[in-house]
Image (tube, grey):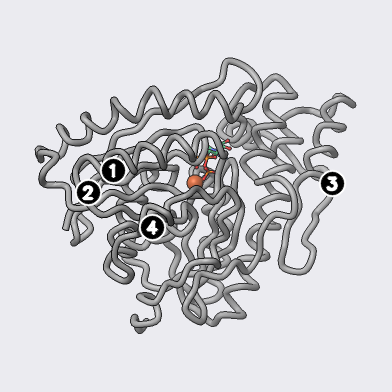
Amino acid sequence: MICLGIEGTAEKTGVGIVDGDGNILAMTGNQLFPEEGGIHPRMAAEHHAEWIPKLIPQAIEESGLSYEDIDMISFSQGPGLGPGLRIVATSARSLALSLKKPIIGVNHCIAHVEVGKLDTGAVNPVSLYVSGGNSQVIAHESGRYRIFGETLDIAIGNCLDHFGRETGLGHPGGPVIEKLSKQGSYIDLPYVVKGMDFSFSGLLSAALREAKKGTPIEDICFSLQETAFSMLVEVTERALSHTQKDEVMLCGGVAANSRLREMLNTMSEEHGAKFYMPEMKLCGDNGVMIAWLGLLMFREFGSMDLSQTGIIQKFRTDEVDIPWVDNVKT
Ligand code: ATP
Ligand code: FE2
């Protein structure tokens, strides 16, 4: 079975081709870089509309296959920006109809976790998924991926990017903040964990206030990272204790940060849990993860009817039955 998957929940357009054993046959993608400000949903949609028709033939060529070899089509059904999701779903439907193949819409956050497991060999981890648009602690329990903790407002990547834009460090802020943080020392910033959830908007405002006051930017970057990452690690640690699992996995674009990796690794070691992180190219948004989850879902549930392929902008991680993980013993 060979699946072609199309990703387009945010500003990255991606196409991947994967076979039933999890071999990656092709991975093509293109990212929109806005000239200024954040991502406008309409611009992201136009980007997908421009790039999907180019990335599909590129992926087919890269795989050395022909269109007839593709057995099914999958696409990111949500969560994400509405206009872009609509372009992705329409493209997937057109391709599936013209090739007369089954179609499956999949959850983007679960796709991050499943491709991470495929790449790292983790079996049943507590996952910290951190990106520009999402921040969730996810673990499988009672037949579904449950959200053990999540952001109450903005995502961690969005927090870093917003800080970068407002202070003239540029977009995306994450990598620049990481670099500057290496020369910084600690200043007090608000640490906000409520129950099992975290919040970054108060932290962002406080960091921006410090920048206005003239506090050295290196100190703010260091403290922003230390505070935000400690919040993420605390919630992951509590989910690990609660679930009694013995694996921790980091995924999403913010996984590029070596300080976050170090903190999560240390916490995992203290609990005797194994720490995993997929290859960086599979951490960010990509079409391969959509294709792989498409295959897993198809094995369990078969094809979707076209009437079930509508987009789900606020698609929650815990809305999908995931029976295959319960069958695995760690
Ligand atoms: P999603 O649709 O899953 O929300 P995304 O569109 O945000 O994904 P990703 O590539 O997963 O795309 O993540 C991009 C984010 O990762 C940006 O917010 C960026 O600042 C952040 N990032 C990249 N490198 C680093 C780094 N070294 N340290 C911290 N954050 C980083
Ligand atoms: Fe993502």
Q: Which label sits in the foreground, 4 or 3?
A: 4
Is the N terminus in the top left, top right, bottom left or bottom right quadrant? bottom left
Task: Tell me where residue 158 appears, x and y as whole percent.
Answer: 65, 38
Residue tagged 2: 24
Judged left or right of residue 288, residue 180 is: right
Judged left or right of residue 212, residue 146 is: left
Secondary element type, mark 2: strand
- Disc 1 to disc 4, how far (Cα)? 15 Å
Please identify the quarter of the rendering in which residue 230 is found.
bottom right
Q: Which label sits in the foreground, 1 or 3?
A: 1
What's the residue type where badge 3 is placed? Asp
| Disc with the residue nearer the chain's start (4 vs 2) | 2
Residue tagged 3: 188
What's the residue type where badge 2 is placed? Ile
Q: Which label sits in the foreground, 1 or 4?
A: 1
Residue tagged 4: 116
Quick one: label 4, few (<14), some, or many (20+) residues within 10 Å? many
Task: Tell me where residue 296 appears, x and y as whole percent.
Answer: 31, 64
Quick one: label 3, few (<14), some, or many (20+) residues within 10 Å? few
Q: Are marks 4 and 2 in contact (CB under 8 Å)?
A: no
**Which label is found at residue 16?**
1
Residue ID at (11%, 46%): 69
Task: Tell me where residue 13 appears, x and y as whole percent.
Answer: 41, 33
Task: Tell me where residue 261 appears, x and y as whole percent.
Answer: 52, 53
**Residue 161, above or below 262:** above
